[in-house]
Amino acid sequence: MLEFLEKTDPEIAQAVRNELKRIRNGVELIPSENFVSMAVLEAMGTIFTNKYSEGYPHKRYYGGNEFVDVVEELAINRAKKLFGAEHVNVQPYSGSPANMACFFALLERGDIFMGLDLSCGGHLTHGSPVNFSGKWYRCIPYAVDRETELIDMDEVRKIALKAKPKLILSGLTCYPRTLDFKAFQEICEEVGAYHMSDISHIAGLVAAGVHPSPVPFADVVTTTTHKTLRGPRGAMIMCKEEHATAIDKAVFPGIQGGPHDHITAAKAVAFHEDLQPEFKDYARQIVKNAKVLAEELMSLGIKLVSNGTDNHLMLIDLTKKNLTGKGKAVQNALEKAGIFVNKNTIPYEPATPFNPSGIRLGTPAITTRGFKESEMKVIAEGIATVINNYEDESKIKKVKEDILELCKEFPLYPELGE
Ligand SMILES: *Cc1c(COP(=O)(O)O)cnc(C)c1O
């Protein structure tokens, strides 16, 4: 498989092989990750990586773009079809720059906007003080309710009426429940704010119709393409026709130069796959798996934030196990057992972001691998055992054996050989 790489750079070739072995021998529960198809992988490795094509189809600043135009138009048209969007820009390098482009298009520096608080499941680019979104704009965050751990739309409305934001951001990176985009839209209309939605995590569920879509309402909708959409690393922006020019200008020349055409090609391939009927089955299975995993974990005495999930992800609250601030230690113990998760803050985190009290997990990648409900039980038991014995090497080793057994039944990337 790595014929040329092996000759030129054996060190990198070896790292790739080691990574392949790592993911094959573990259960990938990081909810922002997935496994792309061989077709998507192949598209990323094409000669389109060589091309410069600043501008947009048929309006480029470089010659020789007739085939790049084919690729970008296919990506745009497929994305439009997938989400029913009026206008799509497929050039953003990743989710963070896509969000930045929207802020540039719709706001002036210093403008007030609202986003979900980072510790309650928002993204860094939703107004965190360490991020451009919190440094250049005035973010008034909304949070989840302390008791229910749900977003209370009456509370969002109250804050909006007082803060009079120019933009309200609906979106999540660690919120396990359905977002009421219609309610967000109504508040935006009431206070005269733009509605920006960031569906990076849930885009695949939205495309498949297993989560409501903000696209019919929101002014702009951003999403990464590498999470539940199962495409290459990258992002896109969907918007109403009235914002099309501003969005396109904000992406190029506003914050980016030449688009990554090989990635655009892979986005087009992923959208083609996402339009197939099997993708709907895949998205439904993600949610089914998440529900079963959540129920199994709770039945084993693990507390989940908001007591369950509606989407692909869940957040374990370790404080109920007297493991406040032990997210990192538990993440490391799970990794030793071949269960890959990430530590995360919980709402109203009593510890610190670097040593938080939560563990975030999700089912997109394992569902791609073919895991179904019965595998969720094995995984839940493994997770509970490790959490309850996170310093007990022999118990962890025992879980690792079960996980390896499970992984053998579901070969990952068999096409890539050894
Ligand atoms: C992942 C994510 C992003 C950022 O994407 P990157 O590609 O990592 O820059 C932005 N917003 C949300 C909600 C995300 O989940």
Image (cartoon, rainbow, N blue to C red):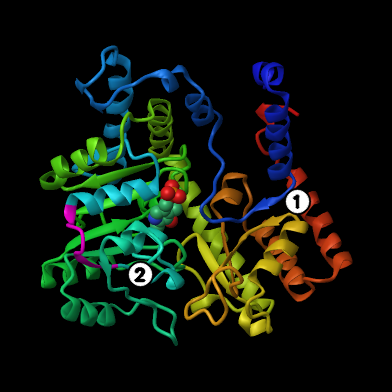
Q: Is residue 204 above or below residue 93?
A: below
Q: Is residue 154 above or below residue 280?
A: below
Query: Is 50 placed left or right of 349 in the picture?
Result: left
Q: Tag 2's secondary structure?
A: loop
Q: Which residue corresponds to the image point at 23% horizontal and 70% vertical from the top-left?
A: 183
**Residue 94: horizontal and vertical position, in percent?**
40, 43
Q: Is mark 1 within 8 Å of ligand 1?
A: no
Q: Is residue 207 visible?
A: no
Residue type highlighted by circle 2:
Leu
Residue type highlighted by circle 1:
Leu
Residue 386: mark in rendering:
none
Q: Is residue 252 above or below residue 69?
A: below
Q: Is mark 2 within 8 Å of ligand 1?
A: no
Query: Is 110 placed left or right of 298 in the picture?
Result: left
**Residue 264: horizontal and vertical position, in percent?**
38, 30
Residue highlighted by disc 2: 116
| Badge 2 density bin: few <14, some 14–19, many ≥20, Cα 10 Å | many
User: Which of the 4 image quarters holds residue 74?
Assistant: top left
Q: Tag 1's secondary structure?
A: helix
Q: Which residue corresponds to the image point at 32% horizontal and 60% vertical from the top-left?
A: 133
Q: Which residues are magenta?
A: 106-114
Query: Is 70 placed left or right of 188 in the picture?
Result: right
**Residue 380: horizontal and vertical position, in percent?**
68, 66
Residue highlighted by disc 1: 406
User: Which of the 4 image quarters holds residue 107?
Assistant: bottom left
**Residue 333: horizontal and vertical position, in percent?**
75, 64
N-term mark: 1 or 2 = 2
Q: Nearer the viewer, mark 1 or mark 2?
A: 2
Q: Which residue corresponds to the image point at 56% horizontal and 75% vertical from the top-left?
A: 352
Instruction: Answer whether residue 417 is magenta in the image.
Output: no
* Screen quadrant of the N terminus: top right
Instruction: Answer whether residue 110 is magenta in the image.
Output: yes
